[in-house]
Structures are given as C-alpha cells and as structure tokens.
C-alpha cells in the first residue's frame, strides 16, 4: 500500500488514474505513467478528501501488487509529479498530530502498536491509540480549567453574584482531583512493564544452572554452557511471551569472590541489573543452602524485585537440603528431566499478570507521562494548601495554570482560550 498526503494529492491521483473515485470507497483503477500512458499496475484506489482523513489533509491510498518492478515504476512516476516527495519516518502520524487528528499520547500508541509483540502490548497500544489516555488527561484538564475560571471570575468580576462557598468547594475539588492523579501514578509502572517487558534476572552462584535454564526457557541456545565455573561474564537478554506478556530474561554472571578483573565487572553488572529487575529467580544447586542475595540498591530504576527461589539440578544425587534462608516457596527444578519447568513457567506467568495489572484504566506508559503527572500533583498540592492558608488567589491561580500546562505537555494540547469560554458560560457575565 502506497499512501499520499498533502495539497498536491488530488492532482497526482488524477494524473495516475484519470478520475478520482468516490470518497472513502475502494475502486479498481489502472495506474498509468502520465508521460507515456503505460500501465504500471491495476489496483485498488481510495480517496480521502481533507479534513476527513488520517492526516487531516487530502490523502490517497494505492493498493498495488508488491513486486519490485511495480513499486519502482510507481515511485518513479510519483517522484516526477509536482510537489511530491518521499515521506520521512513517521511523517503521516506527525502530520495527524499537527492537524489535530491525534494527540501525542495517541501517536505514541500508534508507534507502540507497530512494535507490539505480545497480546498485552497490543491491547495497551490500541487503548492508547484510541485516545483513552487523552480522554483521561483531557477530563482532568477540563476540570482544572473550570476551577481556574471560577477563581478568575472571583478576581476579575467582584460585582457578580458568585457563590460564597467557592473557596471550600474549590479546595475539595482540587483535593479529589489530586488524589485521582496520585492514584493513577501509583500503578507500580504497570504500563511501562507491559510496553518494555517485565525484567526477570536469573542470579546465583557459578554453575548453579542459570545459563542452562535460560536456554531451556528460550528453547534455543542463547548462552554458552560449560562445566567451567564463571563462563558467563556479561548480561545476556532474551524475550519471551508468557501468557501474552513480554518477559525479558537476564542471564547474569555467577556471584562469587574472584580476583579476575573481567569476572568482577560481570558480577558488578549482575548485581546492578538484578537490583533494577522486577523479578529475580534465585538459583541454588541441589544440596546447597539459599543465602540472602546481595543486590545493588543503587541500581538505576531499583525496583525492590520479587524473589522466586529455584533449587536447580534436582535430578542429581545430593545431600539432604540444608536449612534455607529464604522467605518465598522454593521450586525444585531439573532442566534435564523437565521436573519443575511447568510450575516455574506458571509462577512467572502469574507474576507477569500480577505486575502488569488487569487491563483496566489506561496507565501511563512513558517516563515523560510520569514526570508531567508528578508536576501536576505538586502544583495541585500547592494550590490546595494556598487556598487553605488564605494565600492571594492570584498565586493559587498560577499553580492551577502550571497544573494545566503539565497535563497539556502530555497530550500536546494546551488551549488557554477555553478559559474565557468557561468564565462567560458559567457565570453569564456581560449578559
């Protein structure tokens, strides 16, 4: 499918097909070279006049056969038409945002939908592309504009009959909205976990079977497995689809004391990645005790990971299990016989489902969302406290404007003209 957008689309489509099809109806057309009359292909043509199109501009779609000769000929002819050029990466969606057809969160949802590899990622991306986040944040912004309009009316039109209980009611409205935003933020990064994948680090002593388990879960040889301790020196990653959720397994260097500089660096990286993971699978070979894990508490994005205890190599002869120092249940595992693998996969699937939510209200999916929402709650807190402390309403109003701007940065829509509309509609000033 070849897509055209912009003011010269109508002329280019007419030159190729001879006549435009009915808007939003597919029509079979011969596509010709306007210079020679040669037929390049026969395909379906759709015509979307502005503003009722994806980009908000005149837009056309050419559904043609995908052979290289067909596409090369079509691109050559289109490039010769006045005003046409090849689109840049993401330009159609960017134009849709610029023309008000999509907000920034919906555009991000389109990108996530293209990159989705699991059912959970697809559902979340569709939800965001369909405008669920924009509707949520837009509703909050509308509430804030209404509150700010009341305060502005109090300041600018003191002779009007305004409610005497405006300040306590406004304080209650701000408090309720702040709690809703805070609850939205307190989702344990569910949206980001769905989008980026749940990080699961496999840690343990050398030769505990970490790389063997990674290969078994991935069902392919990802990591090198040898009898020599300390084979893994860096962090290896592999992505799985568990119950429709993206899970990124991290195979790490064995944790031990060593004089080898390269291995020391691998162990440092292992502690760091495990410290920032969502889940840690702690492997201990049968016959050895579980010891408390020493992870890096300063790791970027430290997540206080959930720990799953796994006793590996359960098929080998071993002494009676020593007393474990582990609070969670332990899964007995043998990759050679398959013992414990179904149980481990089920535990991981359940953990992924638990940590990524149930697919209810659309969650924030990016750090920039969380940053702006954090600024929103801070501004609302200041405004609420300012009203209760009797600060000048001008200062309270400025905090509300900051909250509105912070929400607007998420969606890319900040319309100050709405403020005047609300003032005159609610209070009939100047009637």
Image (cartoon, rainbow, N blue to C red):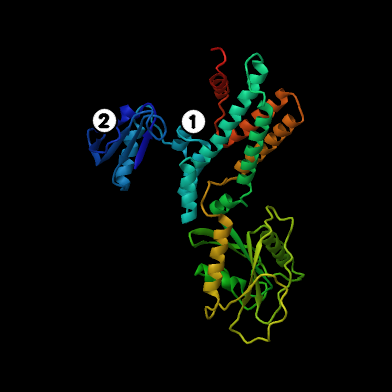
Q: CA distance from mark 1 to mark 2?
A: 26 Å
Residue appearing at x 47%, y 51% in the figure: 123
Task: Residue at 70% x, 79% y: name it.
Answer: 288
Q: Is residue 143 above or below residue 186?
A: above
Q: Residues within 10 Å of mark 1 (few under 14, many from 20)?
A: some
Along the horizontal axis of the image, is 176 left or right of 70? right
SS at mark 2 in the image:
loop
Q: Which residue is mark 1?
A: 98
Q: Earlier in the sequence, mark 1 or mark 2?
A: 2
Give left or right: position of 25 versus 381. left
Q: Quadrant of residue 181?
A: top right
Q: Position of residue 406 (x, y in %)?
A: 63, 34
Residue 376 to residue 392: above or below: below
Task: Farthest residue to the front: give it.
Answer: 164
In the image, taking residue 377 as reference, residue 28 lies left or right, namely left
Question: Could you say whether the residue bearing mark 1 is in a helix, strand or loop?
Answer: helix
Q: Nearer the viewer, residue 6 or 32?
A: 6
Q: Is residue 269 above or below residue 41?
A: below
User: Circle 2 is placed at which residue position?
Assistant: 20
Residue 352 lies, with reference to residue 86, above or below; the image says below
Nearest the viewer among 66 and 213 is 213
Q: Position of residue 75 (x, y in %)?
A: 34, 38
User: Which mark, residue 376?
Assistant: none
Measured as percent of width and height from the top left, residue 164 is found at 67, 23
Res 154 visible = yes
| Quarter placement of the N terminus | top left
């Amino acid at each position: 499918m070849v897509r055209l957008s912009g003011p010269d689309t109508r002329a280019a489509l007419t030159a190729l097909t001879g006549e435009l099809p009915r808007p939003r109806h597919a029509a079979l057309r011969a596509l010709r070279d306007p210079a020679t009359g040669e037929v390049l292909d026969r395909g379906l043509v759709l015509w979307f006049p502005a503003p009722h199109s994806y980009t908000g501009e005149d837009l056309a779609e050419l559904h043609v056969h995908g052979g290289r000769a067909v596409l090369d000929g079509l691109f050559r002819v289109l490039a010769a038409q006045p005003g046409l050029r090849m689109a840049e990466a993401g330009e159609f969606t960017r134009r849709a945002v610029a023309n008000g057809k999509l907000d920034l969160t919906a555009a991000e949802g389109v990108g996530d939908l293209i990159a989705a590899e699991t059912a959970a990622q697809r559902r979340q991306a569709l939800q965001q592309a369909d405008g669920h986040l924009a509707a949520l944040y837009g509703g909050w912004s509308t509430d804030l504009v209404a509150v700010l309009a009341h305060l502005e009316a109090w300041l600018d039109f003191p002779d009007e009959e305004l409610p005497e209980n405006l300040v306590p009611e406004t304080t209650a409205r701000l408090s309720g909205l702040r709690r809703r935003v805070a609850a939205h933020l307190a989702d344990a990064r569910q949206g980001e976990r769905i989008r980026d994948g749940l990080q699961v680090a496999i840690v343990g002593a050398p030769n505990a079977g970490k790389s063997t388990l990674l290969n078994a879960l991935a069902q392919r040889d990802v990591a090198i497995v040898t009898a020599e301790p300390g084979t893994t020196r860096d962090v290896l990653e592999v992505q799985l689809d568990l119950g429709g959720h993206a899970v990124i397994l991290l195979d790490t260097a064995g944790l031990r004391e060593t004089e080898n500089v390269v291995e020391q660096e691998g162990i440092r990286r292992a502690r760091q990645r495990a410290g920032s993971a969502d889940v840690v699978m702690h492997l201990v070979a049968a016959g050895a005790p579980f010891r408390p894990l020493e992870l890096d508490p300063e790791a970027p994005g430290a997540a206080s990971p959930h720990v799953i205890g796994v006793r590996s190599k359960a098929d080998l002869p071993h002494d009676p299990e020593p007393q474990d120092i582990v609070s969670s249940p332990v899964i007995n595992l043998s990759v050679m016989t398959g013992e414990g693998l179904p149980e481990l996969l089920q535990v991981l699937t359940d953990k992924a489902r638990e940590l990524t939510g149930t697919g209810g209200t659309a969650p924030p999916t990016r750090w920039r969302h969380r940053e702006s929402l954090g600024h929103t709650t801070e501004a609302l807190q200041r405004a609420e406290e300012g009203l209760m402390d009797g600060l000048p309403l001008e200062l309270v109003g400025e905090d509300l404007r900051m909250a509105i701007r912070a929400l607007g940065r998420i969606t890319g829509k900040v319309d100050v003209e709405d403020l005047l509309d609300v003032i005159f509609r609610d209070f009939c000033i100047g009637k």
